[in-house]
Image (cartoon, rainbow, N blue to C red):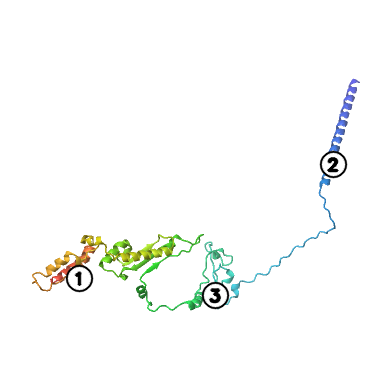
Amino acid sequence: MSANLTRWLERSLHNCHATQSRTALRLFSGQQQQQQQQQQEVEEDEEFRVLNLRAVKKQVAARREIKRDPVPPPRSNRMAVDQDWTAAWPGPRSFHPASVPLPLRQGYTERGAAAPSKFANAELMKIPNFLHLTPPAIRQQCEAIKQFCTPWPKGLETEEKCKHHFPVEVVTTDFCHSLPTIRNPEARRVTVSLKLSELKFDAHAKDKFLRLVGERYNQETDVLTIVADRCPMRKQNYDYALYLLTACYHESFITEPWEETKSEADMEVYHFERNKAKLSAEAILNWNEAAGETKVAPSQGYAKSVEQLINEGENEYNIAKYKKEVLKMLNIPVAN
C-alpha cells in the first residue's frame, strides 16, 4: 500500500514540473515574438518615405541597337598598277597594310612556317619605313626645288679644281638619336685640314711652322690636321681652329732675336747647302785648280742623295743611290 502511494506521489511531482516548464517556454517565446514585432514597427517608422506628387509609370528603356557598317575590302586590292605612288604615300608615316599593294611579311615563326602577313603585324609598324622616298618621289621633289637652285660655278668641274680653289677642308658630325635632348657632346668637334703645299713658306718659316704644329702634320701625306673640341659650341670650335691656323702661319714668319743663335745641331733635318759636306765636295772637285778659274759645284743629285741618306737613315736604296751619285760626280766608270 505504501509502495503504491509513493509511486503516485512521484508521478504527480513529475507531471507538475513538466507543466511548469511548458508554461515558462510559452511565456519566453511569446516575449521574444513581442520584442521582434516592436523592433519591426520602429524600423518602419524610421524608414524615409518618398513624397510622390504625381504617379509616374516606370518606363523601361529600350536597348539601342548599334549598326555596324560592313568592313570594305583593302584599298590595295583596288589600286591601279600605274598609279601615282606619291599621292598614295606622300610623306613619312607608320606602316598601313591596306595602303601598300605589296605582299610584305615579317616576324619570327617556327621552322618551315611562313612569316606573318602584313595585316595586324606589329613588327612592320614598329620599324621606320622609306616608302615615301621612292625614286619617283625623290625625282619629283628634286624637280620642285630645282627652281631655287643656282648653276654650278664654272671652273669647279673636277675634284682637283675644287681642292685647288678651296684647299681648306672642314669636317663636322651630326648625330640623330632618341633622347630627351637633341644635343650631343660629340657634335661640337670640328676638324680642319689642308695640304701644307698650299701655303707659301720660306725655309725659316716652314721650319718654325712645323715646330709649332708638332704632330698635327703628317709628313707622308703632307696634310695638316687641327681638331678643336674645347668650346661647348661647334661655331666656337670652328673659329678657334681657324684662329690657331692663322696664328701659327703668321708667327712662323717672325724671327726672334734668340733664333739667330740657332746652330746646325738644332736643325730638325740635314741640309746639304748649310753643312760642311758641301765645302768638302767643292774642295775635292776643284783640286789643283788655278786661282781665278770657275769652281765646279756638286750636282743636285749628289746633294739630294746625301740629304736623303742622313735624314732617312742607311738602307739598301739610299746607299746604292749615294754610291751612284759619287761615281757620277768623280767621273768613275761603273764596273759591270
Q: How crowded is the residue under tag 2: few (<14 C-alpha within 10 Å), some, or many (20+)?
A: few
User: What amino acid is found at the position of numbered circle 2 in the picture?
Assistant: Gln
Name the secondary structure under disc 3. helix
**Type of amino acid under label 1:** Gly
Q: Residue at x 36, y 75 (%)?
A: 161
Residue matched to label 3: 86
Q: Is residue 147 visible?
A: yes
Compared to residue 96, the image places residue 16 above or below, namely above
Badge 1 density bin: few <14, some 14–19, many ≥20, Cα 10 Å: some
CA separation in Å, label 2 and label 3: 87 Å
Which disc, if any, is residue 147?
Answer: none
Residue 161, compared with residue 311, is above or below; it is below
Q: Earlier in the sequence, mark 2 or mark 3?
A: 2
Is residue 198 positioned above or below 22 on the image?
Answer: below
Instruction: Name the residue at the right extreme.
Output: 1
Circle 2: element type: helix
Per the image, label 1 sits on a secondary structure element best described as helix
Q: CA distance from mark 1 to mark 2?
A: 138 Å
Q: Nearer the viewer, mark 1 or mark 2?
A: 1
- Determine the residue positioned at 37% across, 63% down: 227
Between residue 215 and residue 82, name the one nearer to us. Answer: 215
- The spot of residue 289 in percent (x, y) is 9, 71
Q: Residue 328 in the image: state x and y as whole percent.
A: 15, 71
Task: Quickly name the residue at label 2.
Answer: 38
Query: Whole-percent x and y of residue 223?
Result: 33, 67
Q: Quadrant of the N terminus?
A: top right
Q: Are marks 3 and 1 in contact (CB under 8 Å)?
A: no
Q: Earlier in the sequence, mark 3 or mark 1?
A: 3
Left or right of residue 140: residue 297? left
The residue singled out by tag 1 in the image is: 301
2 and 3 marks in contact (CB < 8 Å): no
Instruction: Give whichever of 302, 258 is nearer the camera.
Output: 258
